[in-house]
Amino acid sequence: MNRIKKALALVCALGICFSFYGCSDSETENSSSEASSVDSTRSEADDSLISSQDESSQAEESNIGEYLLGVADIYEQGSYTLECTVTGTNFDGEVSITRVVRGDDVYQLQQEAMGSHGMITLDGKSYDFDYLCGMYRETDEEPDLNVIEQIISLNLERTDNSDDSSQSEYAVEEYTYVGDTYITVMAFYFDKETGELAEYTTTYTVEGQDDIVETRRIDRLDNNIDESVFNTDFTASLVDFNSMSEDQRLGFCQGLCASFGITAGDLYEMNITADQFKTIDYDELFNLIYTYGSGHM
């Protein structure tokens, strides 16, 4: 049974920045990161509803609670570091995510059992990089809003569906997004004395599927940043995937498959043939290695 790997980027998830669970099954089929964008570090529901927000979602009166607004104040300073640990019912183990923001510059690193990968936007240019596969690419995609910015932007309704008595020592604020065939519920747990965000859970309910529950424990959230992460030094040690010729890409993919024990059966499961390695894209190769890789040999 394949592990669900690329999430977050509900990640991206997606956890630090995540997308509301969309109508596609991309989160649950052939995903390639332990968290969901988590993800991709971009989350893992690339058909995000958040990208199609409109002003009609804004109510005249704010629904946002005082605790969540308090955390939002940290982001409004323009520079911050967020570190969290993600667990979920859709994957095994833990995923650690670090996100550092400096104005328009964003750095994010996702570390999981298989390896580490991330993205960076620096001086208007964005890159994805993957230390496990040894590759990077320049991309036109820009970082998503963080989860709290998304909730405030949509002015989501406050709800009270949580009956988790084990979290009674925390102040809880819950927000719900309702789509046509799916519901996303986010429950935030705050220290009652300090107002600090301790963790939050996201429950994705999709018609006809089992619920997916992800928990993000907040290990750090403050306005101090490590300036040294804002560099593109990785371009010197990783392969520029987009610049490879077809023959170079074929050899690169064959080498990765041999190194990580990818079999012909694995390729069949991903609906990939060896001939397609010449034109395979970055995301497809990423998904293949993180879904079926059995460890570097």
Image (tube, helix red, strand yellow):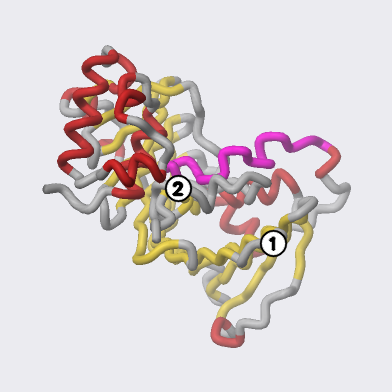
Which amino acid, mark 2?
Ser
Determine whether label 2 and label 1 are within 8 Å by CB. no
Q: Which quarter of the rendering shows the N terminus? A: bottom left
Residue 180 part of the magenta-drawn span: no
Q: Residue at x 72, y 56 (%)?
A: 182
**Which element type, helix, strand or loop, lies under badge 2?**
loop
Which amino acid, mark 1?
Gly
Which callout, 2 or 1, points to the residue nearer the camera?
Answer: 1
Question: Of 245 and 78, which appears nearest the observer?
Answer: 245
Q: Is residue 87 above or below residue 282?
A: below
Splitting the image into 4 quarters, where does residue 201 fall? Answer: bottom right
Where residue 79 appears, as percent x and y from the top left, is 45, 41
The crowding category of the residue bearing disc 2, from other C-alpha atoms within 10 Å (few below 14, some 14 to 19, many at least 20), is many
Where residue 289 appears, as percent x and y from the top left, is 30, 43
Residue placed farthest to the right in the image? 60
Splitting the image into 4 quarters, where does residue 83 fall? Answer: bottom left
Give the residue at mark 2. 31
Give the residue at mark 1. 208
Q: Is residue 140 above or below residue 268?
A: above
**Residue stretch rendered in magenta on the structure:** 37-55
In the drawing, does residue 235 fall left or right of residue 81? left
Q: Residue at x 64, y 62 (%)?
A: 209
Question: Of 63 and 138, which appears nearest the observer?
Answer: 138
Question: Of 37 and 227, which appears nearest the observer?
Answer: 37
Q: Residue at x 68, y 46 (%)?
A: 23
Splitting the image into 4 quarters, where does residue 48 fall? Answer: top right
